[in-house]
Image (cartoon, rainbow, N blue to C red):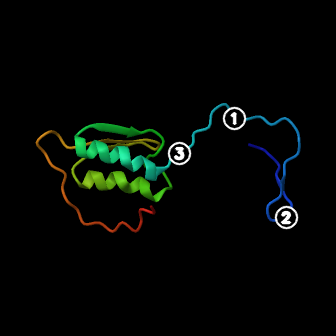
Amino acid sequence: FGVDVKREGDLVYKVPKKAYSNPAKVQVECDASSATYPLAIAAITGGTVTAETVGQESIQGDAAFALLLRDMGCKVEQTANSTTVTGPKKGERLKAIDVDMEPLTD
């Protein structure tokens, strides 16, 4: 945001006094790991959940969780900044999958 921060030592930072202008709007991506819980609830209940700030452009490893749900039979729609998961219709079941979870960081 244009703040001139100077480091002075290991734990000392100096920020000069002056008026700073904040942008009108800042979008902060939510924690992808935390978003997996409501997305999983949609998967097991057949409901629909949207994580509004974690999408296909996320740099977080756990953002790929939705793709696993897709492989398991959920409908997954992603934009650059959102992910919507709809679980299988009534009478349909989630499919078991084999997956290497190492890239999903948490």
Across and down, in percent, residue 42 comes to 29, 42
Q: Earlier in the sequence, mark 3 or mark 2?
A: 2
2 or 1: tag closer to the N-terminus: 2
Q: Which residue is denoted by mark 3 in the rendering?
A: 29
Q: Disc 3 vs disc 2: Cβ atoms closer than 8 Å?
A: no
Quadrant where the C terminus is found in the figure: bottom left
Q: Are marks 3 and 1 in contact (CB under 8 Å)?
A: no
For image coordinates 79% across by 61% down, the residue present is 11
Q: Secondary structure at mark 1?
A: loop
Which residue position is annotated with label 1? 23
> What is the spatial separation of the Cα atoms under label 2 and label 1, in whole angstroms?
30 Å
Mark 3 and mark 2: Cα distance apart in space: 31 Å
Residue 2 falls left or right of residue 69: right
Give the residue type at disc 3: Glu
Residue at mark 2: 9
Q: Nearer the viewer, mark 3 or mark 2?
A: 2
